[in-house]
Image (cartoon, grey):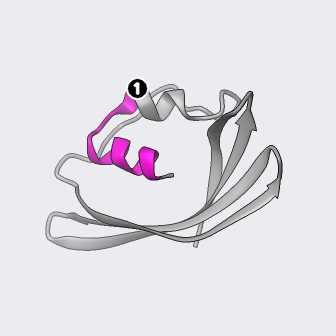
Amino acid sequence: MRSRYSAFVLERGDYLLSTWSPEHRPSEIVFDAGVKWLGLAIRHYRPIDSAHAEVEFVARSRLHGQATRLHEISQFVNNDGRWFYVDGTML
């Protein structure tokens, strides 16, 4: 989760796509121009089984002077020892 947040901060779409589960991966990543990321807080991590986990997080940002909080529970799947983002539920 932290590496994906860092990829958003650095606008590394290639990394985000490579860590996204192929079954749910978008064709491209479009970044909002002018977003300033302010921090990430991991609220909860829950292993479901050896191949699935959930991560609840809050990512804070500012766009055009407006503060925003992205609060999500993300689903991850482990494939051959590597974790991939599947999807998330916004809270």
User: In which quadrant is the C terminus drawn?
Assistant: bottom right
> Overall secondary structure of the magenta stretch?
helix
- Against 9, residue 25 (above or below) is above
Badge 1: residue crowd in 10 Å (few <14, some 14–19, many ≥20): few
19 within the magenta span: no
- The answer to whether 31 appears left or right of 71 in the picture is left
3 within the magenta span: yes
Q: Position of residue 13 (x, y in %)?
A: 38, 31
Q: Position of residue 12 (x, y in %)?
A: 33, 33
- The answer to whether 57 appears left or right of 41 in the picture is right
At a point 83% along the width and 47% down the height, the residue shown is 50
Q: Which residues are magenta?
A: 2-13
Q: In the image, what residue type sits under mark 1?
A: Asp
- Against 54, residue 41 (above or below) is below
At a point 80% along the width and 43% down the height, the residue shown is 51
Q: Which residue is mark 1?
A: 14
- The answer to whether 13 appears left or right of 67 in the picture is right
Q: Nearer the viewer, residue 63 or 60?
A: 60
Q: Position of residue 77 (x, y in %)?
A: 73, 42
Q: Secondary structure at mark 1?
A: helix
Q: Nearer the viewer, residue 61 or 41?
A: 41
Q: Position of residue 4 (x, y in %)?
A: 45, 45
Q: How many marks?
A: 1
Instruction: Give the image quarter of residue 38.
Output: bottom left
- The residue lying furthest to the right in this view is 49
- Against 63, residue 65 (above or below) is below
